[in-house]
Image (cartoon, helix red, strand yellow):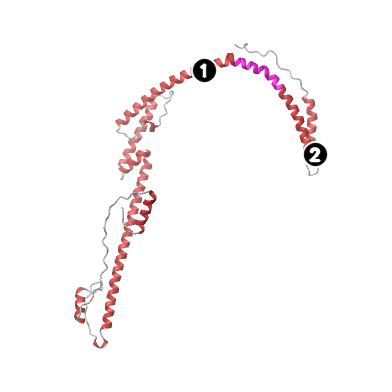
Amino acid sequence: MQDLIVVKQLPQIEEHLKQLSIEVEQKVENAKSLVCTEENVTTIKQIRASLNKEFKEVENQRKIVKEQILAPYMQFEEIYKMYISDKYKSADNDLKEKIDSTENELKNIKEQEIKDYFEEYKKANNIDFVTYSQARINVTLSASRKSLKEQAKQFIDKIVDDLKLIDTQEHKTEILVEYKHSLNVSQAITSVTNRFKAIEEEKKRQEELKRKQLEEAQRRADESIRVQTEATRQALENFIPKSEEKVVHIEMDKNHEITQKGYEQLENVFNKPLEKPREEKQEEILTLRFTVRGTRTKLRELKQFLENGGYDYE
């Protein structure tokens, strides 16, 4: 087949480019040596236009020669495509379709076999929350069935190991729920642990806030009793004239507050009932359970309202 295509005669091109090169080089060097100023810028533009015109004339001749040389080849290429290349390409495309169809069928058969093995091994290990696609096994014709099954086995074995680790954790139920979404055991453990840590910190913050509120309420009650006791003492001092001063023993408790018996002693002194200081009653704390539905923004506003009002909520 070596003699099917032969060039009978090479093209002969007559040119005088070497002689022209000397003249062109001289014109170019003269043009490049010019210094462009405001006075001669118009002249230099004319020189540039003249050089471009000369070059365009020579370039056009080169393109004509190229077309003349390529014309026989283009004609030959059309004949070649019609009688040779198109026939080979047609056969290649037909065979490629047949090969692809067969290989795809073989690949599908192999992949179904790996899927069946995956499901069987998954069931044997009591795993029901993962799918074959999550294993991302790349089934190719070149890959052996043994290596593909090993990939499926390793995927399930890792999940089994992860579940054993999760079972040792404090919040294993919550971690398992998180793990089923990501199949990343470290991420699931960290996420749930941080969540419960935040909850505990919030509980402590609420308890501390409640303790401070109770302390403040108690302080106000103590202050109210102290003020009223001091007012009673001042009233006694102002009521009894200096000339009639006498020693009266009034019973008081360990907090230096007048007891019930002490008020009776004072009533005997004044021969009239006295108004006792009223203790500030702490308002009864009630529990109200209800469900709120609203947008995320509204629920955040409700949460802020409860926190600002000092409410203890869950």
**Residue topped by disc 1:** 92
Residue type at tag 1: Asp
Is 189 one of the magenta-colored residues? no
Mark before the other along the chain sequence, 1 or 2: 2
Q: Residue at x 21, y 76 (%)?
A: 263
Judged from this view, the residue extending furthest toward the front is: 294
Q: Quadrant of residue 247?
A: bottom left
Judged from this view, the residue extending furthest toward the bottom is: 243
Residue type at tag 2: Thr
> Left or right: where does residue 42 sit relative to residue 295?
right
Q: Residue at x 30, y 30 (%)?
A: 123
- Give the foreground label among 1 and 2: 2
Q: What is the x, y in percent for residue 170?
A: 30, 45
**Residue topped by disc 2:** 43
Callout 2: helix, strand or loop? helix
The stretch of residues the image draws in magenta is 65-81
